[in-house]
Amino acid sequence: MTAFWTEPDFDDHEVVHFVHDEKRGLTAIIALHSTHLGPAAGGTRFWHYEDPGAAMRDALRLSRGMSYKNAMAGLPMGGGKAVILADEQRRKTPEMLAAFGEAVNGLGGKYVTAEDVGITVEDMVAVNQQTDYVSGLPVDEGEAGGNPGPFTALGIYLGIKAAVQHKLGRDSVEGVHVSLQGVGSVGGGVARLLAKDGARLTLSDIREDNAASLGEELGADVVSPDAIMAVGCDVFSPNALGAILNEEGIAKLDCAIVAGGANNQLARPENGTMLAERGILYAPDYVINAGGIVSVTMEYLCRRDNAPCDINEVRRRIALIPDRLTKIWQDSEAQASSPDRVADAMAQELIGRR
Ligand code: NAD
């Protein structure tokens, strides 16, 4: 058996915690990649995995992504991530969330959690019963924090506009064709913002009813999940799960730009180069999808330090995403290196790993 810390995904994690509480039905992994810039911050995913190895790989890759994301967003936080291994029915119980909250609390503030796929604001409120190292809690109107989805969507919308400007030389997304894979919290928000600007949209979701009703609301086309990656469009926006940009997926693409919120879109590092070789402009996922972590981090820091929490400060920071992306694309062209590699090098520098 190969030790997982010799796997490339381990990438020098500072510490990885396994939590197993048989009685309360909790099996979880809490991976802390780096605390170089501050406490490791990153959401909790609740997901059914084929096997524990897949859960470990997901936790490690997501955790490293959070180190890079927080560093690139200029936040005083390190990177970590938790995954709770769900059963096939994805049953969640208050006891399980309480056990998870205790585990987070036991880390004494080295890890700060929030929502990710499968975890709601209500779940975070339950976790908060056991620990203060939580963010993404309900907040008052006009304050930073709460559900990170809309803030993530805002950053992606601005990032798509920057990509359209950089690659297509167009100042507006009016008439630009964007196909979206996944129209949940993030993808649905991106679609609504783009629709307001007159973009032409094609939507897809495995929850086909959700895609159909959003399609009707926005006047967008809807295609099956199998067809979305091959839709001829200007921008393909992945907002479901990761690793879709593998050899097979990239071969299907018929677009000029890939820009979306899903974490870990590239199945392997070399897939970024494949996209560049096909002439497709890629927005590194952890740069474009940082809006949510900006918001929940501001919320956490405000609560911790008893400071006021102005939502405008969150918006100001999210508005920096387009320039950050443009700098990456410019450096990528100057260095003849793919945008993901350029971004990785910048992030590694920031967390003291280069
Ligand atoms: P969500 O669960 O609300 O939405 C995901 C949607 O994708 C669901 O509607 C689901 O049915 C759909 N989906 C799953 N597999 C699909 C497939 N193969 N084809 C089409 N649709 C599919 O989750 P979310 O919060 O919108 O997050 C979406 C992605 O963005 C995830 O990768 C998440 O890690 C990432 N992300 C989310 C945030 C956030 O603030 N919520 C922040 C950063 C990154």
Image (tube, grey):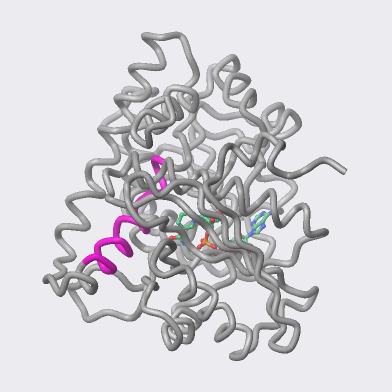
Q: Is residue 292 magenta?
A: yes
Quadrant location of the C terminus in the rendered image: top left
349 vs 273, left or right, is left
Residue drawn where x is 70% and y is 31% of the image:
252
Residue drawn where x is 60% and y is 55% of the image:
16
**Range of residues picked out in magenta:** 287-301
Quadrant location of the N terminus in the rendered image: top right
Nearest the camera: 230 or 38? 38
Residue 245 found in image quarter: top right
Q: Is residue 265 above or below residue 54?
A: above
Q: Position of residue 339 (x, y in %)?
A: 45, 24
Q: Position of residue 195 (x, y in %)?
A: 38, 53
Nearest the camera: 319 or 46? 46
Residue drawn where x is 20% and y is 69% of the image:
302
Q: Position of residue 106 (x, y in %)?
A: 49, 74
Q: Position of residue 166 (x, y in %)?
A: 34, 24
Q: Is residue 255 above or below residue 243?
A: above
Residue 130 found in image quarter: bottom left
Residue 98 found in image quarter: bottom right
